[in-house]
């Protein structure tokens, strides 16, 4: 597999090598050792999630308190989505910026998103099935959101805004500026200190 760092530090695109024949296709969509070489520590996986979405569904922007927050390793097993990583770490050189990876059942890429980063995706097809491995169980009081339609963040969904489907929880979430002003966001220093602690524990 090939692993490429995205423009948001501590996030990566993973492209697996696929082996096809007349029976179908085989690939390794997750290799703990290759990821550990890249990020400096092994993932301690605690939960696996799957969502199935109609075309136009937006999920996110979601994040969790640091520490421990929740690192995510995400792929699409059916259909296609644009998966976004948003830098919400106050003080980061790329604060407020984002990058994206097309996850689909053709190239079968994955994306790794470190703790303290925002995560969002939009379904480009019906029955878009997204599976992700995470490092901490869901903990509602520590989970937060940012409005995915925040013009300051300006995510490019590739779909007309009228066709987007969002939950009330996501549309009612604060803007990036509001979340920052209220002290809700993680800081760059907090995130880096946590990454260092994970690396030292390796």
Image (spheres, rainbow, N blue to C red):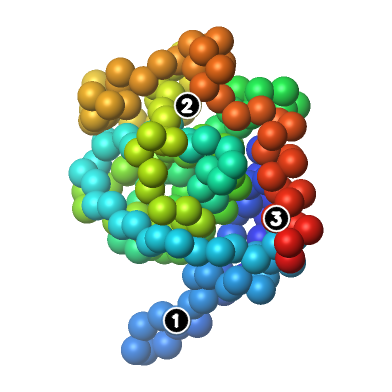
Q: Which mark is residue 26?
A: 1
Point out the residue furthest to the bottom here.
22
Q: Which mark is residue 60?
A: none
Q: Mark 2 packing: few (<14 Cα in 10 Å), some, or many (20+)?
A: some
**Residue 177 spot, x, y in % from top left:** 53, 12
Nearest the viewer among 153 and 91 is 91
Callout 1 secondary element: strand
The structure residue drawn at horizontal position 36% and vertical position 83%, both measured from the top left corner, is 24
Cα separation between marks 1 and 3: 32 Å
The structure residue drawn at horizontal position 50% and vertical position 82%, both measured from the top left corner, is 19
Cα separation between marks 3 and 2: 30 Å
The mark nearer the N terminus, 1 or 2, is 1
Callout 2 secondary element: loop
Residue that carries the numbered disc 2 in the rendered image: 155
Residue that carries the numbered disc 3 in the rendered image: 198
The mark nearer the N terminus, 1 or 3, is 1
The structure residue drawn at horizontal position 32% and vertical position 43%, both measured from the top left corner, is 124
Question: Eyeballing the image, is 32 above or below 162?
Answer: below
Compared across the picture, whether 148 is left or right of 35 comes to left
Nearest the viewer among 124 and 135 is 135
Quadrant for the N terminus, please.
Answer: bottom right
Cα separation between marks 1 and 2: 33 Å
Q: Mark 3 packing: few (<14 Cα in 10 Å), some, or many (20+)?
A: some
Circles 1 and 3: CB atoms closer than 8 Å: no
Compared across the picture, whether 33 is left or right of 107 comes to right
Mark 1 vs mark 3: give the one in front: 3
Quadrant for the C terminus, please.
Answer: bottom right
Residue 18 seen anywhere in this rendered image of the structure: no
**Residue 30 spot, x, y in % from top left:** 53, 70
Residue 42 seen anywhere in this rendered image of the structure: yes
Q: Mark 1 packing: few (<14 Cα in 10 Å), some, or many (20+)?
A: few
């Amino acid at each position: 597999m090939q692993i490429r760092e995205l423009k948001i530090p501590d996030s990566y695109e993973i492209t697996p090598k696929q082996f096809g024949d007349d029976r179908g296709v085989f690939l390794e969509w997750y290799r703990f050792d290759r990821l550990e070489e890249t990020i400096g520590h092994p993932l301690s996986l605690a939960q696996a999630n799957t969502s199935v979405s109609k075309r136009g569904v937006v999920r996110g922007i979601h994040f969790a308190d640091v520490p421990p927050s929740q690192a995510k390793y995400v792929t699409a097993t059916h259909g296609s989505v644009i998966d976004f990583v948003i830098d919400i770490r106050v003080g980061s050189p790329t604060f407020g910026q984002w990058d994206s990876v097309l996850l689909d059942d053709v190239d079968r890429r994955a994306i790794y998103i470190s703790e303290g980063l925002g995560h969002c995706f939009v379904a480009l097809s019906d029955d878009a099935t997204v599976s992700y491995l995470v490092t901490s169980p869901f903990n509602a009081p520590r989970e937060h959101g940012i409005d995915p339609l925040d013009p300051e963040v300006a995510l490019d969904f590739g779909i007309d805004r009228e066709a987007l489907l969002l939950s009330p929880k996501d549309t009612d979430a604060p803007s990036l500026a509001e979340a920052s002003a209220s002290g809700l966001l993680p800081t760059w220093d907090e995130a880096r200190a946590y990454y260092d602690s994970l690396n030292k524990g390796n």
